Amino acid sequence: MGYAALLARMGQVNDVLNAKSLLAWDARTKMPPGGAETRAKQIATLSVMARDMVVADDTLRALDAAEAEVQHLGADTIERTICAQVRDAVSYHRRIPAALVEARAELGSVGQDIWARARAAGDFAAFAPHLEKTVALNREMAEHIGYEGHPYDALMHRFEPGETVATLTPLFARLREAMLPLLRAISDRPAPRIDFLQRAYHADAQLAFGLKMAERVGYDLERGRLDTTVHPFEVSFTRQDVRITTRVNEHWMPACLFGSLHEAGHALYEQNVDPAYTRTPLATDLVGLYAVGGVSFGAHESQSRLFENHVGRSREFWELNFPEARAAFPEQLRDIDAETFWRAINRVAPGFIRVEADELTYDFHIMLRVDLEAALIDGSLAVKDLPEAWNAKIADYLGLSVPDDRVGVLQDVHWSSGQIGTFCNYTIGNVMAGQLYETAIKDKSIADGLARADYAPLRDWMVAHVHTHGRRYTRDELLVRATGRTLDPEPYIAHLTAKYSEIYGLPNAA
């Protein structure tokens, strides 16, 4: 028993997590509604099974033997890295009592139905008892996991290792400092027309065009497929089978198109992890118990936001690809040119719904949720007061008055499954995308490629600097290797400022 035995054991954990992911994919794409209750229990069972395999005595014995076997190797070698990651995961999961894991899984298995009914009725009071139990269990988890500063730090660790309330506070402050004046300046300017995006676009034509654009940036259909769902997502069952989904609104064309590009960015990450890492801890999140190769949720989000926004919403992209859009939708776009289309898909329109938010206002939705979750976990905000606090932040950030809880505090599914601590990943991803893109396009071959609709040089750069490494490096190690520095919001701020200054005729100053 040694390193080979440890890899075999971790391969089995990866198999279980992939089976869980396959059940989850089916539940959100193909499963009849009547299967929801038993499917939730099946997924919970596999989650607990994977956790039990990680903490089992057999795993610990294999780990001890593996560490002894590879101790002569350098600390940064793959073998030593894998052993260290397994050791961290064993320690993490052993700190959390099995009874708490099971209670959280059981609560999450019934939560989505409670949430769905409460949201449909706009009745927060009907969801509040479930959320109170969820918050209590997450507080208990935080105490078992441990933290140095804020209890919310322990919960974020599953999704964005190393991120804390203390590190997010100055990041969010800098983003607000730059973005709020920009948003307010835009509110006084004439908005681009969007009426043509609301014309009748047939679903089949949208799906075909969305998939074509996903392939254009590099999504490999020999190892992937596109399906429809209510809330788009990407899921990987090893790099050989990486699936994406999108949604179709026949009177709002951007939803399908940019949903496809966004999820294709996620898929590129998973399809291009080093094949040698398949079924190993370098392609498995042993702490969060997900079969993913991305080093953090934020790093993963950086790729989806980069290909959706920096590439797919750029003027250059549509100057080159608009003829294909017009060919796909000849009647709907007959009187529209590339410039008008580009301006429309980048229109800023503050709204209530996070998943429908434009590129500039999206992060305000994230900051709101992170602030409220942290307050729920440290006890400074009671669940019963959550709607009032939510509405106040929407008014402060976006100048909107929330009409009801359905489009307010009840809009996200995350809390129903017990998931607290993940929202920061979206803004981390936006910031990372700006930083990575700024560095990449300094390479002339990449800039030249983008200028002729050849996205392979940019994709290859991301593969070499991000994707191929899987989970070998931490997020900040990955950033330093790729860009020479840790997380830096300035490129992202510069990107937003330049784009919206041009669209809305503002002085271009960060």
Image (spheres, rainbow, N blue to C red):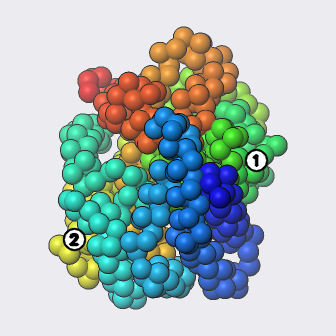
Q: Which residue is disc 1 drawn over?
A: 240
Instruction: Write the residue at 70% across / 40% down.
Output: 275
Residue 459: horizontal and vertical position, in percent?
A: 62, 29
Q: Nearer the viewer, residue 42 or 341?
A: 42
Q: Residue furthest right?
A: 222
Label 1 element class: loop
Give the crowd class for mark 1: few <14, some 14-19, many >=20 residues within 10 Å: some
Residue 279 appears in the figure: yes
Instruction: Write the residue at 42% across / 79% down.
Output: 97
Instruction: Write the residue at 30% across / 27% down.
Output: 506
Q: Quadrant of residue 155?
A: bottom left
Give yes or no for contact between labels 1 and 2 (Cβ–Cβ under 8 Å). Answer: no
Residue 305 appears in the figure: no
Residue 95 shows which numbered tag? Answer: none
Amino acid type, callout 2? Asp
Task: Using the image, determine if residue 329 lies above or below residue 464.
Answer: below
Spatial distance from mark 1 to mark 2, Cα to Cα?
42 Å
Q: Which residue is disc 2 drawn over?
A: 378
The answer to whether 166 appears left or right of 126 in the picture is left
Which one is earlier in the sequence, the residue at label 1 or at label 2?
A: 1
Label 2 element class: helix
